[in-house]
Every structure is written in structure tokens, then in C-alpha cells.
Image (tube, grey):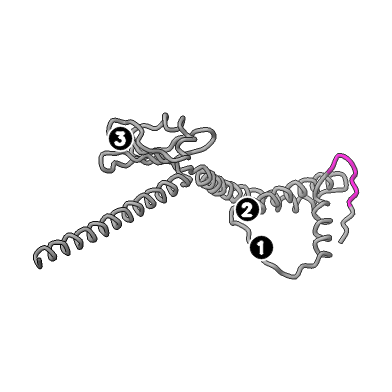
């Protein structure tokens, strides 16, 4: 009787352990499915287009961005890294091999390219501004000397030369200021001085018609 009871107790314990293992397996499987879903959701909301290819080149997986850019995928070759222009945008293409599959990603670098171009243009503009400033300085000095030696008939011409030089100098200063970058700093400002500066600046411009300006503070 004791042996039979021991066998029954052993079977009962085995069944209970089997049930617990089955529950743990179900919980583990559920956690794995949830993890898969989270990973799929994360990949799907990525701003980067992503394709995963089988060894035979067939499509294994793609996210929503990749689905929207199916035509872009047709332009990609097998180079590990490349740049492709597509629909007024520039994409950086990267290809990696992992466990017999190819992972292809397309990152939109349009803004980065635009920033690089602006930086290059800024460098060129700064160089040109410096190159132009030297001869303009010489012309300005000569115009001032000429104005002192002119008579009433030729003085307006010398003054017009000075106005033109002044406008060029303002463009040069604005260009150099742009290339250096501008930061706003709060400070006390006298608007009366701004009014005076604006009135002085307008004197250096010649107009085909008479214009009247009224600056109100």
C-alpha cells in the first residue's frame, strides 16, 4: 500500500510540475510574442526605410517607410554604402549582411546635405567678401581724395561714387555677419539712435523718383 501511495504521490507531483512548466512555457511564449510585436512596432515607426532580404534576394521584411519608398529600393545597388537622389531628396544607403540576410537601410540626409552646402556657400561668400573689401577700401579712399579736389560741377559725381561704395561695404558687412552667425542678446536700445541711423543710411541711396519717409517711434 505504501508503494502504491508513493507512486500516486509521485505521479501527482509530476503532473503538477508538468502543469507549472506548461504555464511557464505559455507565459514565456506570450512574452516572446509581445517582444516581437514591440520590436516590429519600433522598426515600423522608424524614420529610416528598412528592408530585410533573404539570401536569394527576395523580400523578408520591410517597415512602413520602406513600403512608401518601393521605387527608391529599385535604385539601390549592392554597394555597402552609397548616396541616392530621389524625388528632390538625398538618401544614404547602407547594406549589412547578418545571418544569411541582407539589411538595407535608407536614411534621409537631405537637411544634412543642405546644411553642408550652406556652410560651403558661407565659406565662399566670406572669402569673396574679404577679397572685395580690399579694393573697395582703396576706391573709397580715392573717392574721398577726389571729392576734396573737385569743383561744384564734378562734386555730385564723386558723392555718387561714395554712395555706391557705401552700399557695397554694407553688403560686405552683412555677408560677413551672416557667415559668422548671429546671436540675439537682450539689451537696452535707444530707438532715437535707430531713427537717426536709418535717416543717414537712406541718404546714401539714389532714387529715380523723390520719396518721403516718416519714421515713427
Residue 37 in percent (x, y) is at 40, 48
Mark 2 vs 3, N-terminal side = 3
Q: Circle 2 sits on which residue?
A: 178
In the image, 137 versus 110, the foreground residue is 110
Q: Circle 1 sits on which residue?
A: 184
Residue 17 in percent (x, y) is at 22, 60
Q: Is residue 48 above or below residue 25?
A: above
Q: Circle 3 sits on which residue?
A: 54
Where residue 1 sits, quadrant-wise, is bottom left
Which stretch did the figure color magenta? 207-213
Residue plotted at (75% across, 70% down): 188
Q: Nearer the viewer, mark 1 or mark 3?
A: 3
Q: Is residue 108 above or below residue 28?
A: above
Residue plotted at (32% across, 51% down): 29
Q: Is residue 192 above or below residue 67?
A: below
In the image, 85 versus 210, the foreground residue is 85
Amino acid at each position: 500500500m505504501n508503494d502504491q501511495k508513493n507512486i500516486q504521490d509521485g505521479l501527482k507531483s509530476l503532473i503538477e510540475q508538468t502543469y507549472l512548466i506548461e504555464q511557464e512555457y505559455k507565459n514565456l511564449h506570450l512574452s516572446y510574442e509581445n517582444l516581437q510585436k514591440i520590436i516590429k512596432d519600433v522598426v515600423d515607426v522608424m524614420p529610416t526605410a528598412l528592408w530585410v532580404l533573404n539570401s536569394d534576394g527576395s523580400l523578408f521584411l520591410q517597415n512602413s517607410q520602406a513600403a512608401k519608398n518601393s521605387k527608391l529600393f529599385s535604385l539601390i545597388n549592392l554597394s555597402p554604402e552609397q548616396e541616392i537622389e530621389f524625388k528632390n531628396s538625398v538618401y544614404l544607403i547602407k547594406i549589412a549582411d547578418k545571418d544569411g540576410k541582407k539589411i538595407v537601410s535608407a536614411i534621409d540626409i537631405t537637411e544634412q546635405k543642405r546644411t553642408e552646402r550652406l556652410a560651403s556657400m558661407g565659406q565662399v561668400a566670406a572669402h569673396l567678401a574679404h577679397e572685395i573689401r580690399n579694393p573697395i577700401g582703396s576706391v573709397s579712399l580715392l573717392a574721398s581724395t577726389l571729392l576734396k579736389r573737385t569743383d561744384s560741377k564734378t562734386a555730385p559725381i564723386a558723392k555718387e561714387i561714395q554712395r555706391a561704395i557705401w552700399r557695397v561695404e554694407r553688403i560686405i558687412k552683412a555677408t560677413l555677419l551672416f557667415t559668422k552667425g548671429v546671436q540675439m542678446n537682450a539689451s537696452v536700445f535707444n530707438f532715437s539712435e535707430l531713427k537717426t541711423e536709418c535717416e543717414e543710411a537712406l541718404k546714401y541711396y539714389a532714387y529715380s523718383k523723390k520719396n518721403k519717409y516718416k519714421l515713427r517711434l
